[in-house]
Amino acid sequence: MSFTDEMLCTKSHEYIVKQAENCYIIGLTDYAIEQLGDIVFLELPAVNDEFSKGDTFANIESVKAASEIYMPISGKVIEINEKLIDSPEMLNEDCFENGWLIKVEHTAGNNELEDLMSYTDYKEELE
């Protein structure tokens, strides 16, 4: 099974993948990265920061644009992808397995996942 088979996506181009009970990886979809172009800067939250679904949790800049990144679920940050702070351009090469942004402990009910779509549905909606 591939990484994208496990993924749920938002309309604002974030993805989440369940890693363990109440633990999710959050990142930006390949479509979002393609639209941004060459990534030059990424600002991530601190470990233990807490966010509600829909909050801005990170900022990203490319040669084309600056953009906010939104929380797809409510949760507490338990890990950030440190490698991306110094080398945000890694996102252009791999925004999935090695290019995840943060890991969160989900702090709300699973009904928060109901408005997320599978990667297949997400790709179809983009067409």
Image (spheres, rainbow, N blue to C red):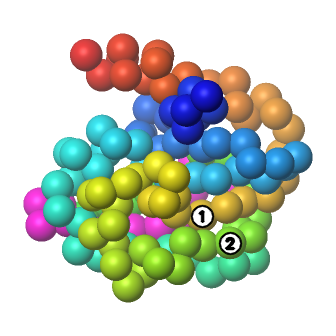
Three-letter amino acid code of the residue under disc 2:
Glu
User: Is residue 64 inside the magenta stretch?
Assistant: yes
Visible in this render: residue 49?
Answer: no
The image quarter containing residue 72 is top right
Is 17 on the left-hand or right-hand side of 29?
A: right
Badge 1 marks a residue whose secondary structure is strand
* Residue 89 higher or lower than 4, as above or below: below
Neighbours of disc 2 within 10 Å: few (<14), some (14-19), many (20+): some
Visible in this render: residue 78?
Answer: yes
Instruction: Tell me the quarter of the image containing the N terminus.
Output: top right
Residue at 40% from the left image edge and 43% from the top image edge: 29
Residue at 75% from the left image edge and 77% from the top image edge: 48
Badge 2 marks a residue whose secondary structure is strand
Which numbered disc, 1 or 2, marks the residue that appears first in the sequence? 2
The image quarter containing residue 114 is top right
- In the picture of the structure, the residue carrying the numbered disc 2 is 79
* Residue 118 higher or lower than 28, as above or below: above
Q: Which residues are magenta?
A: 52-65
* Residue 9 higher or lower than 65, as above or below: above
Q: Residue furthest bottom?
A: 86
- The residue closer to the viewer here, 66 or 7, is 7
- In the picture of the structure, the residue carrying the numbered disc 1 is 102
Do labels 1 and 2 touch, CB within 8 Å? yes
